Every structure is written in structure tokens, then in C-alpha cells.
Image (cartoon, rainbow, N blue to C red):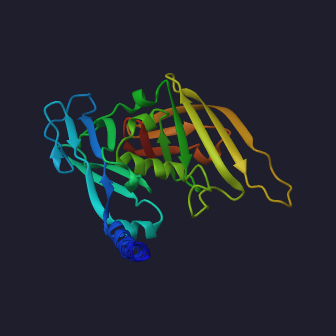
Amino acid sequence: MKICKRTEFIKLKILLPLVLMVSLSSCVSRLSRPAMSGVIVDYDKKPVADCRVGETRTDKNGKFYLTERRYNKFLLSEIMMMEAPPVNVMEPITKEGFNSDAISLFNPRGGGQAKGANYQIDTIFLKRTNQQFDINSLLANNTWNLSYTKNADTIYMVSPKFKDWCKTENCRAFYNNYEVLTDNYYHSNGNNLKDGIIKRFIEVRFNGDHSGKLQQVQHYKHTYEGPNKPSDTLHTNITWAFTKPDVIKFVIPKQAEINQPYKIVMVDLYQMMLIKSKE
């Protein structure tokens, strides 16, 4: 009886390490790209057929589908990492006669998602290379958010509709340029606004008769020692007019920094970039 128990114990001592070794040398499935689907249309909401999206093309209705991609990693190496790997996707969008763009997706722990991961993008608007805009119509009777550089030589404008419209890399890069000029804590440089200001948010209402209203909220840096300046809000009337088809002049008595003409160098449905005009 004792011999049998001893034999079983020896077998267990041998088998347990073997089972552990096999388990740790087995693989775990990781996500490198979720399945991605959506529709690509032009600015008239017409489907863009035969448009390349990653390794596939859109059908006659502008629809595309990218399959899920996965890879295997040794369980032991993943245990040592202590966390799921990131997912970083960049799928180019190209079509002759249109501006190239890309679908981007980043999730710092996304690699741990189970099989069947899906990313529904809905509708992507692709801009034609010769796309024309009626800038007056884009502004009139609409509200835009505005940020500008320290010396007020460049203005970035985004519509409140921007985030619902923006699904691709080009517009996200533009929004980053806008956002770093609203918050000194957002960017590692931390020197985008004038000394003492940590946040500045500006909203402009453009009326159809070329009048309008500006609202600005500024937050100031606080220190333990003080004295500290409280946040302030500015409300003021403005006028705006085109001195040339691509030059707009703001008249804002209480906001002298941008009370001058600007050349519109980039325009899209819900974003604009202006630089100080020399006229």
C-alpha cells in the first residue's frame, strides 16, 4: 500500500511540472484589428464606389468591410507583460479625384478583446480634390468654436457638429491643432496661451446680416501662495465681412488680438484655418 502511494506521488511530481510547462507554452489569441465596416460618400452624400480602403474596395453603394485580424502569442510571455497589448490601426483611403485619408484606431489595451471584435464606423465623407464651398453660407446663422495662436497669426475654427462628422485621420489631426490652443494642460509644451492663462474657450455666433456675438471664457493659473485671479467671461458684439472672396475681417472692439483681416487657407464642412492677412 505504501509503495502504491509513493508511486502515485512520484507520478504527480513528474506530471505537474509537465502540465505547467505545456500550459505556459500554449498560445493566447490577440487582436491586431477588429472587423471594420462603413460607407463612404462624397459631400453630396452620393456613394463613392471602387474606393480603396485598406486591402479592400467599396461596392457600388460605397460600403466596405475589413475582416478581423488576430495573432497568437505565447501565454508565458503575455503573463510576464501583465497587461493586454495595444491595438493601433491605420487603414488608408484612396480614390482618384478625392483627397487621400485614413481610418485610424488606437486602444492601449485593445489587443485583449475576444474574437468577434467589431468597429462600426457608419458614414465617412470623402472630400473631392476640387471641392468648392460657399464660405458665407457655412458661417451665416451658425455657431463656430475658435482658438488662435499666442501671437494671433493663425486661427482654427471648428463647428459644434465637428465631432459627429469627423471619422478619419485628416480631421482628427486638425482638431488636435485646435484643441492645443484652448488648454495649456492638454499639450506637453504647456505654453500655447499667454502667461497666466491655462484655458480659453471662444464661441462665435455669425448672423446672416454679418453681425454676431462672441463669448470667451478664460481660466487662470492658481498658486498656493496666491493671490489668484478668478475665471472671467467676455460677451461682446462683433461684425464680420469679406474684403476678398478668401479674406474675412472681424471687427471685435473688446478682442483686439483678432480684430483684423484673415485669409482663409483651408476650409471644410465643419473646420476652417485662417492666417493673418497682409492687406
In this rendering, is residue 222 above or below 48? below
| Rendered residue at 85%/57% (across/down) | 226
In this rendering, is residue 255 above or below 6? above
Residue 207 x/y as whole percent? 53, 24
Residue 149 x/y as whole percent? 55, 54
Residue 276 visible here: no
**Residue 89 position by quadrant:** bottom left
Residue extending furthest toward the front: 1
Residue 119 x/y as whole percent? 33, 42
In-front residue for pair 120/8:
8
| Rendered residue at 59%/58% (across/down) | 192
**Residue 19 position by quadrant:** bottom left
Total marks shown come to 0
In this rendering, is residue 45 above or below 32? above
In-front residue for pair 102/249:
102
For the N terminus, give its image quadrant.
bottom left
| Rendered residue at 47%/26% (across/down) | 140
Residue 78 visible here: yes
In this rendering, is residue 55 above or below 144? below
| Rendered residue at 42%/74% (across/down) | 9
Residue 148 x/y as whole percent? 55, 49
In-front residue for pair 165/273:
165
In-front residue for pair 146/207:
146
